[in-house]
Amino acid sequence: MPGLLSFLANRQAGSFVPGIDDLVYGNKDQKVMGVAEKMKKGQQAVADLAAFKHARKSKNDAAAKTALDRFTANKEFLGYGYLSTPEEAVPPVSTAFYSFHIMVVLGSFFPVLFVACLFYTFKKKIATTRWLLSFGVISLFLGYVAQQMGWVVAEVGRQPWAIQGLMPVKVATTNIAVGHVQATFFMFLAVFPLLLIAEIKIMLKQISIGPEGM
């Protein structure tokens, strides 16, 4: 809808809303700084921070103060100093886009299902309305899908940042040994399927028994 995004962003129809190209490559007319320029400032901030640490370690207070002053001027761009290319600042857009839409569609479907269940419950027909019960069983797993899609939107959408503008994910990686991470992964890989199988068996058993009093 023309003008709607600018209204949502700035409460003015027709106002400028920067797009991906504006944010990555800059827009001089709109005074939007590109990532390449931010990377230069960030690289300077990284160098000044290293110089500050070295001066502190050497107990050179004058050099430490000079380096700290230079760092302070560019500290908001610190994270950009670790990027390799301007395009690296762009998250996987399609993944976040489709994950968000799946989440929204399911989030709209669930209230409709809840209202339908409530309606048939009041009519005392919920136990005999097989199509609705089928949707209910399927929706149990759709809830997990919606949850995971929300996680994908949050984690993929914030790439490449662990802290916006200050720390990219590749700098925030853990120092834990690879073997420890692999051991934890395979432990969960073994336990979770077992729990899933147990849950499905319990559900099928209860479904075969049917509602009490019927």
Image: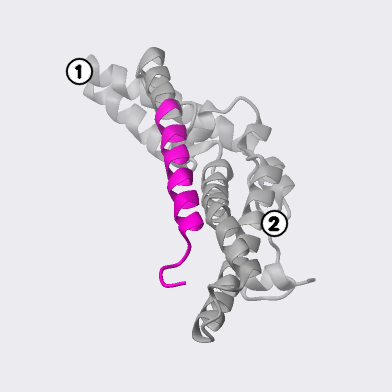
Amino acid type for the residue under numbered disc 2: Gln
The residue labelled by disc 2 is: 30
76 or 2: nearer the viewer: 2
User: Where residue 59 is drawn, which disc sits there?
Assistant: 1
| Coloring applied to the structure | one colour
- In the displayed structure, 165 sits above or below 31; it is above
Q: In the image, is residue 199 part of the stretch drawn in magenta?
A: yes
**Range of magenta residues:** 190-214
- In the displayed structure, 60 sits above or below 99; it is above
Residue 62: percent from the left, percent from the top?
26, 25
Amino acid type for the residue under numbered disc 1: Lys
Q: What is the crowding at mark 1: few (fewer than 14 residues within 10 Å), some, or many (at least 20)?
A: few
SS category of the residue bearing label 2: loop
Is residue 122 at least partly visible in the picture? yes
Nearer mark to the viewer, of 2 and 1: 2
Residue 27: percent from the left, percent from the top?
72, 49
Is residue 173 at least partly visible in the picture? no
Residue drawn 64% across the image and 47% down it: 96
Quadrant that contains the N terminus: bottom right
146 or 87: nearer the viewer: 146
Furthest-front residue in this view: 214
- Name the dominant secondary structure of the magenta segment: helix
Nearest to N terminus: mark 2 or mark 1? 2
Residue 57: percent from the left, percent from the top?
23, 16
Instruction: Measure the C-alpha gap from mark 2 to mark 1.
Output: 45 Å
Residue drawn 45% across the image and 42% down it: 76
Furthest-right residue in this view: 2
